[in-house]
Amino acid sequence: MQTKKSILLICYFIILLCTMLVVLEPPCCAMQIQLTFDKVIKSSDVIFVGQVTDQQCRYGPNQNMIFTDVCFEVQELMYQSQKAKLSSSNDITLTFAGGQIGERGFSVSDVPSFETGEVYLICTIMDGETYASPIVGAYQGLYRIVKDELTGIDYPLYGSRPISKIIKNKLVFGPAVSGIRGSALQPAAAGKLEPANFLNKEAPQPSAGFKGIRAWISPPPPVPEEIMNLDQFIAEINKRIE
């Protein structure tokens, strides 16, 4: 009799644990290989600069998974491969795993989030398949565009870090910034969280933290003498497309 009670008790706790895992839906973990800049460009089906105009969350076909559709108004379509499934060159919608519907939320590491109204340069996979994130190499194909408050010149940021140069086919970054004013970098607040890819660890490695971010754990790089503006960065991309 005691043995039966023990078995029933164990079964009860197993069922309880499984129920908690389903209800809580913790962030999924992903693994990404660090890519060279050439590889990011050459792996892309579509490369464009666009402004986020809308974001809508919805359930997947089985009603279990949540997806977020992010709509971009295209400002510049830089590249489109022959296999790219692109219905319009004026608006592009990308779908990402995760989102929030009511009190139910679901997140996946290495899946970026976007701000409506912000402008981004995106290297994306658009081959008709479904991915957790269609961005090439997770964050590696995503650059947020910020405007110099005084000059009006646009600059690409990887997370919140400007690009100073490209050495041996790898991007070199400056320290995290909150903005750019008169070509001068405005330092980001202390404790700024950055995408896991910023740590430049040897790949493959599991991402850590919520939404693929983790705390800065190494000294920030020195302030570069010059940083790439958007036109210069696009010129570097075009060299690799041709």
Image (tube, rainbow, N blue to C red):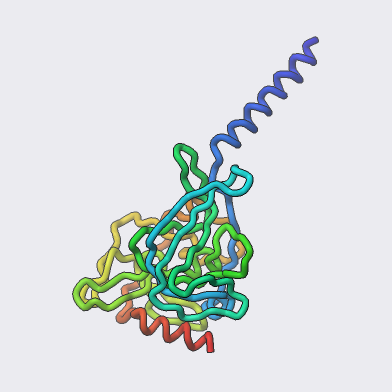
> Is residue 82 rendered to the left or right of residue 220?
right
Residue 177 rendering spot, x and y as whole percentages: 31, 66
Question: Quadrant of residue 231 in the image?
Answer: bottom left
> Is residue 230 rendered to the left or right of residue 186?
right
Q: Is residue 139 above or below residue 56?
A: below
Q: Is residue 17 above or below residue 217?
A: above
> Front-most of 188 and 179?
179
Residue 141 rendering spot, x and y as whole percentages: 49, 70
- Residue at point 31%, 70% (across, down): 146
- Residue at point 35%, 70% (across, down): 145
Question: Quadrant of residue 157 in the image?
Answer: bottom left
> Is residue 1 rendered to the left or right of residue 186?
right
> Front-most of 6 and 144?
144
- Whether residue 216 is visible, yes or no, is no
The quadrant in which the N terminus is found is top right
- Residue at point 38%, 75% (across, down): 75
